[in-house]
Image (cartoon, grey):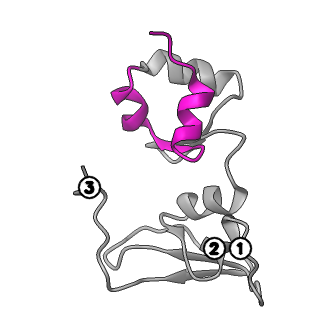
Amino acid sequence: MQRILSQDMARFGYLARRAQLYDLGYSERDLRRGLDGRRLWPIGRSRVAHPGADGRATRAVALGGRLAAGSAPASYGVWVTRPDGLWVAVPQDASRVPPLGPGEHRLRPREHFPHTSDRQ
């Protein structure tokens, strides 16, 4: 079966770990071709983004976290009464996180959200 990179990236919300794409059968050469052809952008060493990715989500991943507070529902089109910049949640034990830009805020929630799901 022939895989289509843009369709597989859409499955991951246009942001994916390289390992996720390798698990689907893509090779390092396939990803390099996508990066060279501007169909993918590198985010750090282990992640890639597709041009269809939400800019706020891409920035949150580049900052070492995920969207939080009002930024998360806004990325799904939910109306937020007072959008006040980009809110990013990072793990409590995160180190070497990049510096924030103007209007960016970092949260360190106490809850632990596993990367895997127990749903079948």
Helix, strand or loop status at disc 2: helix
Instruction: Provide the residue designation for mark 2.
Output: 73
Residue visible at 74% across and 79% down? 102
Distance Cα–Cα, label 2 vs label 1: 5 Å
- Of 101 and 16, nearer the camera is 16
| Residue 14 visible at all | yes
Tell me the magenta residue range: 1-25
Query: Which quarter of the image is occupied by the N terminus?
Result: top left
> Looking at numbered disc 2 in the image, what kind of residue is underneath it?
Pro
Location of residue 120 in the rendering, given as x and y in whole percent from the top left corner? 24, 49
Quadrant of res 52? top right
Is 9 situated above or below 85? above
Residue visible at 58% across and 72% down? 99
Q: Are marks 1 and 3 in contact (CB under 8 Å)?
A: no
Instruction: Provide the residue designation for mark 1.
Output: 78
Q: Is residue 9 magenta?
A: yes
Camera-side mark, 2 or 3: 3
Q: Is residue 42 magenta?
A: no
Residue visible at 73% across and 80% down? 85
Specify few, some or many for label 1: CA neighbours under 10 Å numbering under 14, 14-19, or 20 or more. few
Instruction: Provide the residue designation for mark 3.
Output: 119
Q: Are marks 2 and 1 in contact (CB under 8 Å)?
A: yes
Mark positioned earlier in the residue sequence (2 or 3): 2
> Looking at numbered disc 3 in the image, what kind of residue is underneath it?
Arg
Mark positioned earlier in the residue sequence (2 or 1): 2
Quadrant of res 94? bottom left
Residue visible at 77% across and 89% down? 81
Distance Cα–Cα, label 2 vs label 3: 23 Å
Distance Cα–Cα, label 1 vs label 3: 26 Å
Mark positioned earlier in the residue sequence (1 or 3): 1
